[in-house]
Image (tube, rainbow, N blue to C red):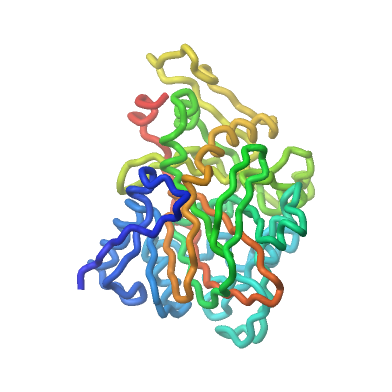
Amino acid sequence: MAIVLVPLPLPTSADTSKFADFGREVRGVDPGYLDPDQFAEVQAALYKYDILLFRDVSLTPEQQYALTKAFDPQSENYGHGNNKTASTNKSILHPDLKTIPRVPQVQLIGNGTVYNHEGLAEAKLKHPSHTTFHKTHVSPEDEARGVTRFYRWHIDAALYDLSPPKATTLYGLVVPGGPKQVCRYDDGTGNELPVPLGTTAFVSGKTMFDILPAELKSVAVRSKIKYAPHPYVWMAPAHAMSTGLGNESEGLELPLDELPPWEEERCKTLPVVWKNPVTGHLHFQVHPCGVAELLVDPLPDGAKREGALYPDGAHLTDLQEVRDLLYKMQRPAIAPKLVYPHDWREKDLVVFHNRGVLHSVVGAFTKDQVRAFHQCNLAASDDPVGPSPEDIEKWA
C-alpha cells in the first residue's frame, strides 16, 4: 500500500495559511515495519512537514529505537547521553525521565505510578509543572479551573558535548482523558490558547525565521549561540518566564565553578538558523533557556548598512541583553495562531524534526492521573549546518 499523507487537524485558533506545509498524518504503513523505500518516503516527508503522526500504532521499544536511529544511522546513544542526565541530580531534567532497562535509548515519561512496565517494576512519573520552574505561577484557583502554561519551549538536545538529535519519536501508551485547558501567556498581551489536556505544543522554526523583519533576519543568519556548559544543571536554580520561552535574568544560574567537571572544547556553539538538508529552508532553532552568549558576524561586503543591527559584528556576553534580543526574535512565533497543540490519543506515534521545530510540555495532571509515553531521540552524528554564504548574502 502506498503512503498517504493527510494534513493534521488544526485547532480553530490556527492561522491555516501558516500551516500549509506543516504536519501530516501518515497512513498506509506500519512505522515498526518500514521497508527501505517506505522509510525514504517517510524521511522526505519529515523534513518537508516537520511533524508526522501515525495513529493506532503498536510499537516495541526496540522498534522505536530502530525507527529513530534510521534517521541518523551513525547515531547510537540517547540525546542527553545514556543515563547521564538521570544520574545528575542537579539537572532540571532529572525527575522527568526513566530509562527502559533493555533499550536505554528509550525513556519512559508521563505522570503517576506505572507498574511492571518493560522491565521496570515500579516507575513514579511526574508531568513537568510550570509551578516548579516559572518565576510566577497560575493561582491555585485558576489552575483548578483548567488554566495552565507552556512549561519550557525547547529543542531536544544536551547542548553540551553531544550534537542535537535529528528526529524525536514520542509514543503515547496511556493517555488520560479530561476537559480541555487554557494555556495562558501571562505576559501582558492577553494571549491564551485552548489546549487538550496534556498536549505537546509545537511551533515551526521555519515560520519563526520567515516572519522576522529584515533587520532581525540579518542578525539571525549572521549569528551563533554559545550554550552554557551542562546547561540543564546550570539553569536548574533559575526561573523561567511566564511564556516558557527562556529564563528570567535574576543571576540565579549555577556558577561555572560549581558545575560538574566540564571542558571548553565540549561546549556547543551552534548557528541561530539551521538549514534543512532536504528543502533548503532556514529554521530558527535556539533553545533559549540554555543560551550563554551570542556571537554576531559583521555584515558581508556590499550589504546595506543603513538600519542594520550590529553591522560590524558583536560578541554579546551580558545575559540580559542576549535574552532580550532572542525573546524579541522568538516570541512572535509562539503566538496562539502559530501553535499546533497535538491532541493525544492512545497509540499515537509522533515523529518530529527536532532540528526544525520547537516544542513544549503543557498542562497539569493530578497525581492520580496516569500517563505513560515512550520518548526516543539520539545524539546526532554531526552538528546542524547553518546558512550558506548565498543565504547570508540574501538575508544579511
Rendered location of residue 384, percent (x, y): 44, 46
Which sits in the foreground, 89 or 209? Answer: 209
Is residue 228 visible in the rendered structure shown here?
Answer: no
Rendered location of residue 355, percent (x, y): 45, 50
Is residue 190 visible in the rendered structure shown here?
Answer: yes
Residue 25 placement, left or right of 188:
left
Quadrant that contains the N terminus: bottom left
Where is residue 91, by image quadrant?
bottom right
Residue, x 23% and y 67% (percent of image)?
Answer: 37
Which sits in the foreground, 78 or 352? Answer: 352
Residue 28 placement, left or right of 303:
left
Where is residue 373, by image quadrant?
bottom right
Q: Eyeballing the image, is 35 above or below 190?
A: below
Residue, x 34% and y 59% (percent of image)?
Answer: 24
Where is residue 326, by image quadrant?
top right
Residue, x 73% and y 53% (percent of image)?
Answer: 138
Q: Eyeballing the image, is 350 above or below 165?
A: below
Residue 105 placement, left or right of 21:
right
Which sits in the foreground, 20 or 72? Answer: 20
Rendered location of residue 183, percent (x, y): 61, 53
